[in-house]
Image (spheres, rainbow, N blue to C red):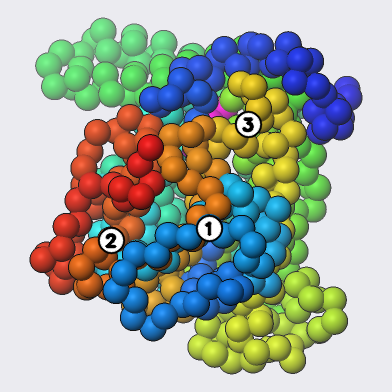
Amino acid sequence: MFNRRTFFRGATLGLGGLYFAPFLRDVEGATGKSGKPARVLFFVQGNGVYPHEIQPKGIDLPRDPDKLEDRPLKGHAMALSLEPLEPWVDKMTMIHGLSGRIARGSHNSGFAALGCWPMGKKAYGETVDAGLARHLESIYPHIGLGVSNKALSVTYNVTSADRGKALPSVLNPVLAHKRYFAAGAKGAARKDFDVDTTLLDFMADDVKRMQARLTGSERAKLERYLEAFESMSGRQSKLASLADRIAEATPTIDPKLGLISDTKTGPTGVFDRLEAQFDIAAGTMIAGLTNVVTVSAGAGPDRIGLSCMASEVDSKNSGFIGSHGIGHGGSAAGMSSGECHARIRRKCLEKLAKFIRTLESIPEAGGSMMDNTLIVYMSDSAEGHHPLCTQWPFVLIGDLGGRLKLGNRYLRYPWYGKPGHRTIANLYVSLLQAVGDKRDTFGIHDNALLDLNQDGPLAELTV
């Protein structure tokens, strides 16, 4: 087996187009309005994205701006924490001034960050990533991955498909690797996949036999079980048919990354796990398994960001950096709280940068996969550790295959309550409409902004 990344780095578009012809035909179904493939990655980080810590050099951040500012980003050096993304300034759009006060929480907003409803409520409905997944159909409509300083393999933290239907985030990269790439595996791992397939087929047949003995409401209830088993069985069959493609896209993961323990004051390995999760995210997209992935880092209920050893983010410093302490302004390992935040964010974005390079190396539709991808970077804690949510910074990379007017832009909207102010719900409507969703509202309105228009997309992003 050749090294997949080495192959694609050296491939010409002609060779890549020939090799990926089946893949390109398959993804034509997930195109939205423009006819090009489309995919989205959300990267949700805990403990806030502090506006002044990501502000480009040479662009002022007024205390209470009352006018829209729309200017080029190019020519302005990135802040320390965003430097890993500087090579993509032409594809980058930074948005300041949006609010999401309806979702305000204490240390985070959890599901509400992507759903625009009161924090702590899972029953309100669909988050934006799940909404996009419904329109960008694939074998796995949505894949949730993440890292945490808690010893958990799976959590339910930021994504919801419907009322009370939270979707999982797999926090153990070894488990995620097994779950999504088993169909392309060899040996024992593939045997496990085949056993699961056979079991699902058997259970579906068993339900059919039982259903024949029932009538009325009991038969109707059993029908839902049958639909579930047949759906899972169908997915297994699709995965099996893509075994070769999945094998080629499967990243190599260190088995040691599956050993997760609660972080107190020892080495965490959290950034190695995050890198593995981004590798898995890229692999699932390249294999055509999904078009929507959400990666979370220390985000969600009872999460307050990432703690780490200082040496993991700055070789000159030693000691432990606790996310809760620096969130309250405490210094750690000889660094101020702001510098600790910046170093942790920079390390996370280094991993995101690797993901971008991987997608850039894969030919697609006359360009690369990255040309048809949108990355949304944000925090579930808006602008701070204990956020007001009157300002919710976003950094976007890519334009979703030309579906959005993004790239080389710094957008700052009028501050909370001022004429022209917009919310994160308006941004989410923009993303949804870009893939063919006709809705004009999202989530729940902010009662304190009833005098302002909270409906519709951000006109500045509309193509």
The residue mark sitting in front, 3 or 2, is: 2
Residue type indicated by callout 1: Pro
Residue type indicated by callout 2: Arg
Q: Is residue 54 above or below residue 358?
A: below
Q: Nearer the viewer, residue 370 or 115?
A: 370
Q: Quadrant of the C terminus?
A: top left
Q: Quadrant of the N terminus?
A: top right
Provide the residue designation for mark 3: 369
Which secondary structure type mostly characterizes the magenta part of the structure? loop
Residue shown at 79% from the left, 53% from the top: 256
Q: Earlier in the sequence, mark 1 or mark 3?
A: 1
Residue type indicated by callout 3: Met
Quarter location, residue 348: bottom right
- Counting from the top left corner in percent of width and height, residue 357 is at 72, 43
Residue shown at 68% from the left, 58% from the top: 86
Provide the residue designation for mark 2: 422
Q: Secondary structure at mark 3?
A: helix
Question: Over which residues does the magenta segment extend?
Answer: 289-293
Provide the residue designation for mark 1: 72
Assess whether residue 453 is covered by the magenta stretch. no
Quarter location, residue 137: top left
Distance, label 1 to label 3, CA atoms, is 24 Å
Q: Is residue 165 left or right of residue 398?
A: left
Q: Earlier in the sequence, mark 3 or mark 2?
A: 3
Residue shown at 79% from the left, 47% from the top: 255
